[in-house]
Amino acid sequence: MKNISLNTILEKDNLTKKDIVSLLSLKDPLDFKLLYQKADDVRKEYCGDEVHLRGIIEFSNYCDQHCLYCGLRLHNTGLERYRMTKEEIINAAHFIYESGIRTIVLQSGEDHKFDCKEIEEIITAIKKDLDVAITLSTGEREFYEYKRWKDAGADRYLLKHETANPKLYSVYHQGDELDERIEHIKYLKSIGFQVGSGNIIGLPQQTIKDVANDILLLKELDVDMCSISPFIPSQNTPYRNEENGDINLVLRTMAVARIVLRNSHIPATTALATLGSDGREKGLDVGANVIMPNFTPQPYKEKYLIYENKARTDSDPKIFVKQLHKLIESVGRKVGNTKGHSLKVKEEA
Ligand code: SAH
């Protein structure tokens, strides 16, 4: 693209869909540089230099869903399943706190055996013991369950829209509807959750226009956080022979999302680090301000196989957190020491 037209787009206050498609379609590494620089400037202005760490506990890999891309899908009989006990989950939360991290993310497949009350009790116990924020990432549940968990003290909910293309959404999710997913995201927001959403890039049949629509949907939903990650084919799924998502397209999408969303939190995801050993640094350079180290204890950690070869981290999460501190400082940033709430709501005193 001619630099004049690229600069004109980058100087605009509001990007149109056409602008977004042009940015996502850039091919020249020199153009990437201009785009990434702009995203980094926006990140600095709206989010500052802090990188927030969120400790994640993947507490169950049972799942009732059939998502064609995901290794946790119900029909994957090749996966050994586990559920952590309440005590194991609470212990893992303490471990995260002792590592200096003030957000606990509780993630699982859609596992209804963990009923409303049990998750409520886990939230209550963690909140009683520890001064932390809790993010839930347990898929689509009943609205009354979301409300009970919010009332028990959960702060945030992460529910990715996965793709903004309604036809592809129904293909990937075996007939489920995007509109329903969006209703859930809107409901979560309406009852006071800080809401995270996001998409997967590089799924079969997806186009650049679909990715542009992902960004516009995230803007419309006014998300507090968005996770943009590459597709990674997973064994024992119908998409096992597909290709990885394009890392450069993921980086461009993160950069454009940063420019469009301004102050939403954006993680440098584990999936990005899986595609390249410097994935996290690259993510931090193009607008990311969050990293989510994995605190799932052994022997469960190896079994949460959304996809294989998840970026190998040091088996001791405390050592990994130290490495992350170094990494964050080496790119001129600071490790956040607060709960790192949404930048759209005031941080509690
Ligand atoms: N059950 C929860 C959490 C699911 S796992 C939920 O539905 O929200 C968390 C995320 O992993 C999903 O939202 C999806 O975006 C991502 N994911 C699943 N399979 C993937 C794959 N093969 N490549 C990249 N990301 C994947």
Image (tube, helix red, strand yellow):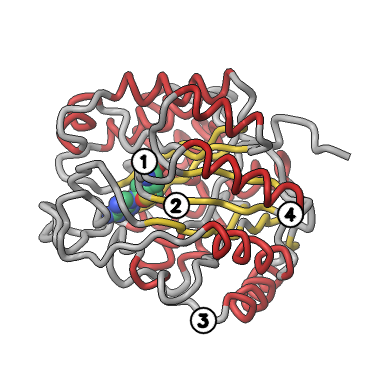
| Picture residue at 16% right of the left edge, 65% below the top | 78
- The residue carrying mark 4 is 49
User: Splitting the image into 4 quarters, where does residue 234 fall?
Assistant: bottom left
Q: What residue type is labelled 2?
A: Phe
Q: In this figure, which residue is indicated by the disc labeled 3? A: 314
Q: Which residue is drawn at 34% across and 33% down?
A: 21
Instruction: Determine which residue is flagged by label 1.
Output: 112
Q: Nearer the viewer, mark 4 or mark 2?
A: 4
Q: Position of residue 165 (x, y in %)?
A: 26, 28
Dot 3 or dot 2, earlier in sequence? 2
On screen, residue 281 versus residue 211, left or right, reads right
Q: Mark 2 or 1, which is nearer the eye? A: 1
Q: Please identify, in this view, whether the residue under mark 4 or under mark 3 is nearer the observer.
A: 3
The residue where tag 2 is placed is: 32
Indicate the position of residue 152 as horizontal and vertical percent values.
Answer: 66, 35
- Report, in whole angstroms, how far the alpha carbon at label 1 lies from the one at label 4: 39 Å
Residue at image position (65%, 36%) is 263
Measured in 3D between alpha carbons, the distance from the residue under mark 4 to the one under mark 2, in whole angstroms, is: 21 Å
Q: Which of marks 1 and 4 is in front?
A: 1
Q: Which amino acid does label 1 sit on?
A: His
Q: How crowded is mark 2: few (under 14 residues within 10 Å), some or many (20 or more)?
A: some
